[in-house]
Amino acid sequence: MNYTCNACWIQFTSTKDQRSHMQTEWHRYNLKRKVADLPAVDEKTFNEKVTKINETKKEVDNFGLKTSEKDAKLSPKDLKKLQKQELLKKKQDLLELAKKQIELKLKRVQDDGSLTLSPEVEKSLADKVAQLSQDIEKIQFKNKPKEPISEEEIYRKKLANQVQFKEIDCLFCPINSNKKITNFEENLEHMSLKHGFLFPEETYLADKNGLFKYLSEKIGLGNMCLCCNFEGRSTESVQQHMIMKTHCKVPYYTEDEKLEISEFYDFSEYNKKSRFRKKYGGESIEEYNEEDEEEEEEWDDIEGDEGDEEARGELVVTRRVDKSGNYYYEDDNGIDYSDAIFNSGDKLYLPNGLVLGHKKDLQKFEKHTKKERTVTEGQGTVLAAESRHFITLIDQKELDEKKRTWQKEVRDKKKHEKNYSKNANTQMFYRDQLLQ
Amino acid sequence: MSIAISEQDTNLLLTTKNVLEDTVLDKYQLAGKITQTTLQYITSLINSCYHDNNKDENQLFSISQLCFLADLFMNQLLNKDFKGKTLEKGIAFPCSIDIDEISNGWSPELGDTTFMQEKNRDAVEKNLSSGIKSSLKNFLSVGDLAKITLGCHIDGYTSQITHTLCVYPTEVNSATGLAQASGPLLGAKADAAAIAHIAKEVVVNLLASAASPEKLPESLRAINVNGEAKVTGHLIRKVVNHLVESYNCALVPGSKIRRIRRFLAGQNEGVVAEREFKGCVWYESDQETAFLNKSHQYQKDLNSNEQSKALTLLQNSENTHENKQKSAFIYDSAIATDSFTVLPGEVYLVDLKIVSLSETPELGLISVETLSEFSGTTATGRNMTVRNSQFIRDFTQLKDLKLRASRECLAKMDKQSVYPVKLTYLSDEYQKLTQSPIELNLQNINYTEEQAIITKENLKSRMGMNEIMDNFLATSKAVQIVKYIPWELIVNLSNPEGVKSIDAVNPTLPGFEIPLPKLNISALKLKSLFKHADTIPLPVAREACTVAITDDLTYKLTHSEPIYLNSNFELNPLESLTQGVYQLVELAKDSRFGIKVRTVKPLSDKAIRSEVPDMTD
């Protein structure tokens, strides 16, 4: 059959049926649900909902007849508005009065140079001011909103309502509803098959149970959706939300999301592999030990932390032979560098990212390591505000080159931003936050 | 090699970062709080030893110790974990205690006193003026007008305060049993201190009314061109001059009311020619103009069509001066003029130095003499040799230094911010001390060992600093004293070389290198007059504060209470300017309709004690 309605998930035998269906209230309701990312409801549920709403409406109407007409006209919103206007008016009056008072005083200053007003005038003005400010306070007191519940209280409430998940409980089905699952593996299988839930980067997941426990607490205690920032009133509501919106997944894209669950992962294996692959295309770790022939060699740090002056040029690693005849690397302080990952003959690559160069190349490196002066914000500001000119100081050629670099920097930055915003948009459909 | 800042960065650093947003305002307020707390601390230190009869000479804190303790306290406060990440923070103005005629820059290092006493051995005791005497002794004495200057910056947003204190003779109050001053401060010093305080307050109100210029009183408005309702530099100058004159006082050259920006709070004046300078400055040339306006002959010459020889000469020299100004700087914005308007969203520094003229025999010029390591070597025995203690890095200069000590010193200096540093700040021992908790009990303060180590470390830095200074990589902040020179001496002076010579050592703002352009007197000529026997050093009062103006509220970042004094002068209420000032003050008093000024309060005791202070109060 070719005739379908995508909003209501039904099929028809003829176009006529389809057309008439499209005109029903039920279809319109489902269309709205679709926009809000919610699944369709069948006709029976829809009719039930309609009757329920009608009943409540009737009750309200009956009740409404009894109340006075005046109150019916003024909704709470209107009342608030009125009060606000009143307050504003009072405040304006007060300002006017203050203005009048000060003007009188100023006039007095101009007339005879004294700074005080006659006592009667001052007293009457002061009375008025006091009266007005009292009124304002009264109104403000009336309008005071209820005190919000303290954070502690919220937490206590949440603790009381906590739902404990066991390892055999599915995170998304209502708790204790599925009796068939007997162990953790089965549970995971159920979640992946039924809800499409998978742990991100499962190969490097070191603590599966820990992550499961963390996620279950997020749902059971925090009533938070795993995927978006939705916070439900209860565990059931969150579960409903996640199933309905197909949020049964752990996002793993941005830095924050990765960091949130990073404690359960172990990427050391991956890092080791990738670094090695990048540098030497898969050479093995042991290789460097066998190549060396000299008995004692010295290595100097060449690509060290540039800001740290003491470290530069002072880290000296010496190769020695221990009793059993094996080589080991050690610096002046006796720190062992044997786990250096690679020796390329004139460079020694350390696992912490430092690269040591051979002492014979010291002169060559020293030439290149002359630091460019970095300018702090304060120094930059002072220099930018400087308007003395120094004829000898500005080298036009150099300045031109610098200008070109700046322009390129700005260009690159813009390009990067553009690319980033393009790639970061992984959402398939636009979803309106208000309609959730 | 040149260092140039790209246009985008210039725009960011000078404009974007200076927009007075909430975060920026918070930083300004925090800087103000810390500055005020430190002022409170040093005031209580001075009170505890100099206003207590029970203490003998050995128990007193010396001036250099007071400076050291105040700096330490401020650094310890700054090191606390205030909310909000800051890139740079630190002392913006080292604590200096200037006594009587010393107008700025007296902040001796811990070991400097012995050196200076040795150097000034030849000075004749009875010829020395009171401020120099106390400063050389390194202890305050009764009757001294001590001006305390402090400042700090949070992320470059700076607040500064200067407050004038007096050391009173004390007596024990029979009712309370506490020591109190036996009487108010009187005479010339009182006049100067009183009007300095009044002028500061009035200027703050005037600046605050920039947010709502329509409220500006009529008589003040009339001063502006076309009676426009806005706060201009012209108006500020008129008001301050009026107030000062009515107390028979004069403004010391170098007094200023200027806009400050991030990292540009006036610390570099005289070194860096800052572009887009906004502010009123008072220099000798203003006094010269006022003096010439009083002269009948000059007025007559101006009005008559036939130009006299003297006037032609004057105008010629004026023209060459203007040409010089133009040729020296491309950016005219670096030269201060009065034709600016104060706008909301700006931060201003009010810094007024005032001397009383009641002890001067005749009309004269108030000028400042710069003291240096060589200034005392005259036969008169009236001068003092000093050792400069505050150094400011000139970042435009680059050079490879030869000595290891100077290279180390320069590296440490570059790590500090763009504000003046003392050698003490470069010492490792001092940096260690700043991490230690604050000692709040004044009786327990005892850093004897640390002070000895710091003094030793300073010796090394001092050696390095000499090479740095020789290569102009840094300049020192001068110690200056205020002197009165009778006009008679100046007018009789001949200056055949013209005004071309400029005193490069003296830190003046660009465009003000020649002190008396109309009378054709250069700075070097004027300098030679300071040795003359007819010049008189005058005690100076100084008040400074920082004000941040926003659209609806003006924040007075630093505040100080007036001292106990009694002046014979008062403002004449019949003059229209005085009335304007009264009306302005009245407006500032009213909380609803008037000018809204909020004074930032110092940190509470609790906040000082706690590790992570709560800034909500």
Image: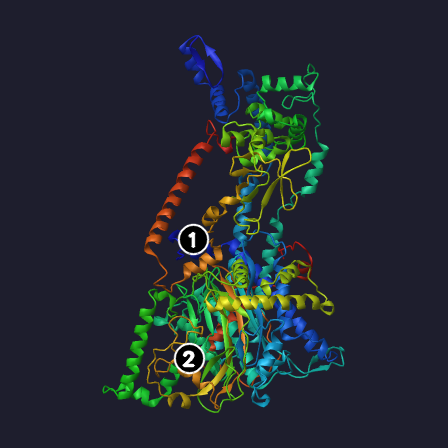
* Residue type at the position of mark 1: Leu
- Chain-order first, disc 2 or disc 1: 1
Q: Is residue B144 visible?
A: no
Left or right of residue A406: residue A57: right
Q: Residue reaching furthest front?
A: A294
The relative height of residue B81 versus residue B214 in the rendered view (above or below) is: above
Q: CA distance from mark 2 to mark 1?
A: 36 Å
The local crowd at label 1, few if under 14, some if 14 to 19, many if 20 or more residues have their Cα within 10 Å, is few
* Residue type at the position of mark 2: Glu
Contact between labelled residues 1 and 2, with CB atoms less than 8 Å apart:
no
The relative height of residue A366 versus residue A435 in the rendered view (above or below) is: below
Nearest the eye: A36 or A84 = A36
Chain ID for label 2? Answer: B
Nearest the eye: B513 or B232 = B513
Nearest the eye: B499 or B216 = B499
Residue position for label 2: B284
Residue B391 placed where, x, y %? 52, 68
Left or right of residue A237: residue A100: left
Secondary structure under tag 2 reads helix
The local crowd at label 2, few if under 14, some if 14 to 19, many if 20 or more residues have their Cα within 10 Å, is many
Secondary structure under tag 1 reads helix
Q: Is residue B503 visible?
A: yes
Residue B293 placed where, x, y %? 36, 84
The relative height of residue B106 versus residue A304 in the rendered view (above or below) is: below
Per the rendering, the mark at residue B55 is none
* Quadrant housing residue A192: top right
- Which quadrant of the rendered structure holds the N terminus of chain A? top left
Residue position for label 1: B12
Are the numbered discs 2 and 1 placed on the same chain, yes or no?
Answer: yes
* Quadrant housing residue A44: top right
Residue B325 placed where, x, y %? 33, 72
